[in-house]
Amino acid sequence: MKIRGKVFVFGDNVNTDEIIPARYLNTSDPQELAKYCMEDARPGFGRRDDIKGAIIVAGENFGCGSSREHAPVAIKAAGISCVIAKSFARIFFRNAINIGLPIVELKEAGEFEEGDVAEVDLENGIVRNVTKNREYRIQPYPDFLMEIMRTGGWLEYCLKTLKE
């Protein structure tokens, strides 16, 4: 599973209220949430045409704050294909995996700049900054996580497993 996209850079400690502000939580519709993705960190981000397939690259502690599941849902529904960060808040990490949003911890995330093109190979554990021709090693996703990603999330994975 390879992911390639334009990079949008965010800083450290991006919290779930910046990812999807509480004032927009009057719905659980993913497409409605997507419109307000990253609204308090970068107003209008979720309504941009150029974020489909893009990759968010951030610093430390991405997804900190509340445990709201809406945050990774908004990111995925906005069309973001992957989030790379130096580190993730534990609950955000779990919620992202549960909905099938690929996330990658990369200590060198700060080497990416806005507009770079990134490529992520989850199976082989490689992240590339295509623009700067740099390659980084990460822990490859284990087989069961790859299957969760392929099926679109934990619930879809469970339903598929039950049918088999």
Image: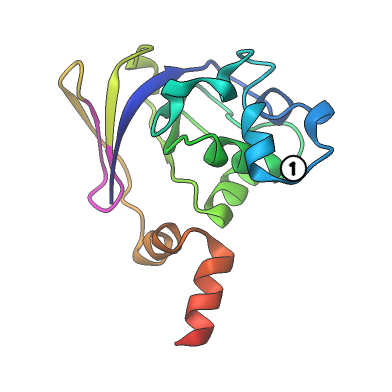
The amino acid type found where label 1 is placed reads: Ser
Query: Residue, x 64% and y 28% (percent of image)?
Result: 35
Neighbour tally class for label 1: few under 14, some 14-19, many 20 plus, Cα within 10 Å = some
Where in the figure is residue 70, as x and y percent of width and height? 70, 42
Q: Residue 47: percent from the left, percent from the top? A: 57, 22
Q: Residue at x 19, y 15 (%)?
A: 132
Check the image and name the residue furthest to the bottom.
164
Asked if 144 appears above or below 133 in the picture, the reply is: below
Q: Is residue 108 visible?
A: no
- Main secondary structure of the magenta stretch: strand
Residue 8 among those drawn in magenta:
no
Q: Is residue 76 left or right of residue 149?
A: right
Q: Is residue 127 magenta?
A: yes
The percent coordinates of residue 42 (x first, y second) are 60, 13
* Residue 63 quadrant: top right
Q: Quadrant of residue 107?
A: top left
Residue found 46% across the figure and 22% down from its top: 49
Q: Nearer the viewer, residue 130 or 5?
A: 5
Outermost residue, left side = 133
- What residue does disc 1 label? 67
Q: Is residue 100 above or below residue 42?
A: below
Report the quarter where the C terminus lies.
Answer: bottom left
Q: Is residue 159 visible?
A: yes
How many numbered discs sit on the rendered protein?
A: 1
What span is colored magenta in the figure? 120-129
SS category of the residue bearing label 1: loop
Left or right of 158 in this view: 69? right
Q: How is the image coloured?
A: rainbow
Residue 153 % position (x, y): 52, 59
- Residue at 70% x, 30% y: name it: 20
